[in-house]
Amino acid sequence: MPAPTPIILDCDPGTDDALALLLALASPELDVLAVTAAGGNVGLELTLRNALALTALAGSRAPVYSGADRPLLGAFVNAPRVHGVDGLGGIALPSGGSPAPGIASDAIRAILRSAQRPVTLVGIAPATNLALALASEPKLAGNVERIVLMSGAWGEGNATPAAEFNALNDPEALEILLASGRPVELATLELTAQAQATPERIAALRAAGTGRSLKTACDIQASVPSSPRRGHGAGAPLHDPCAIAYLIRPDLFTTRACSVRMDLGPGPSRGRTVIDRWDSTSAPHNATVLETINADAFFALLGERLARLP
Ligand code: RIB
Ligand code: CA
């Protein structure tokens, strides 16, 4: 097996973040150098607490850093309807340890500065921490292998008609990453909608093993309300784990190089990712967008990996 890919995982747990974090910690293809928490789905105090608890649940010693409690401009808009007021659908976990000293953006820069190999930045939250790190020391982008994000949408948003939640919560941060000069790869809402965590799939996950992490992951996901407004029927799209699975099994995905531009205005389309899927403009390709996923294989991978955890 090739050497594991060093990653920094920036998250806002968050029900789908929880499964993504556990998947990353369970996968030998990845070396999770650090977990960084941002506000987003719920406030930073809760996302940090949840990240610490999940990392401890997985038996990982990865350091967890506290990060941004607000975007570069304005304030985060939380999503308690989806994630519960505690961020994990009311599923109580034993508390984790204490956060590592310092703040996320400083930790990201320190890791990049001393990295022996280029590091992959993985963002499944509003991108504030990642953007602060790269904007305050741009030359460190040279130590970034790639930036893989769950963010954006070709079309309809889920936070507003125009914008996906992570992109809306810090559009300037996403713009900074798109302009970083490093490869940016996006798992958008259209990709994650293909990974619908139906009751049947959650039942199959439960049957994959007997560990507490797997059970907890299934309990958390089962707490998520169905998203009928997007016509998906029972269950909800499993957004964030798609970004992790892409790192582990890129063969389960198809992708397309595109230009992606941000709407940074104050109006109703703020936070929209304007993705030129058919090259209808002459805008340069500055991102790769994940187009399809083999959903059955994705859920099989998720179950096999979560079953490895304690
Ligand atoms: O739009 C889905 C994204 O927003 C996911 O990362 C989810 O956790 C929320 O943060
Ligand atoms: Ca998230």
Image (cartoon, rainbow, N blue to C red):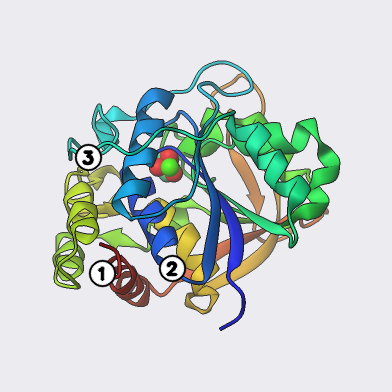
For discs 3 and 1, the disc positioned in front in the rendered view: 3
Helix or strand or loop: what does disc 3 sit on? loop
For discs 2 and 3, the disc positioned in front in the rendered view: 3
Q: Earlier in the sequence, mark 2 or mark 3?
A: 2
Q: Quadrant of the C terminus?
A: bottom left
Amino acid type of disc 1?
Ala
Amino acid type of disc 2?
Ser
Helix or strand or loop: what does disc 1 sit on? loop
**Mark drawn on residue 27:** 2
Q: Earlier in the sequence, mark 1 or mark 2?
A: 2
Amino acid type of disc 3?
Pro
Mark 2 surroundings within 10 Å by alpha-carbon count, few (fewer than 14), some (14 through 19), many (20 or more)? many
- Residue furthest bottom as drawn: 1
**Mark drawn on residue 307:** 1
Q: Earlier in the sequence, mark 3 or mark 1?
A: 3
- Residue at image location 64% in from the left, 33% down from the top: 105
Residue under pointer 3: 94
Where does residue 242 sit, x and y in percent of width and height?
A: 44, 60
**Mark drawn on residue 152:** none
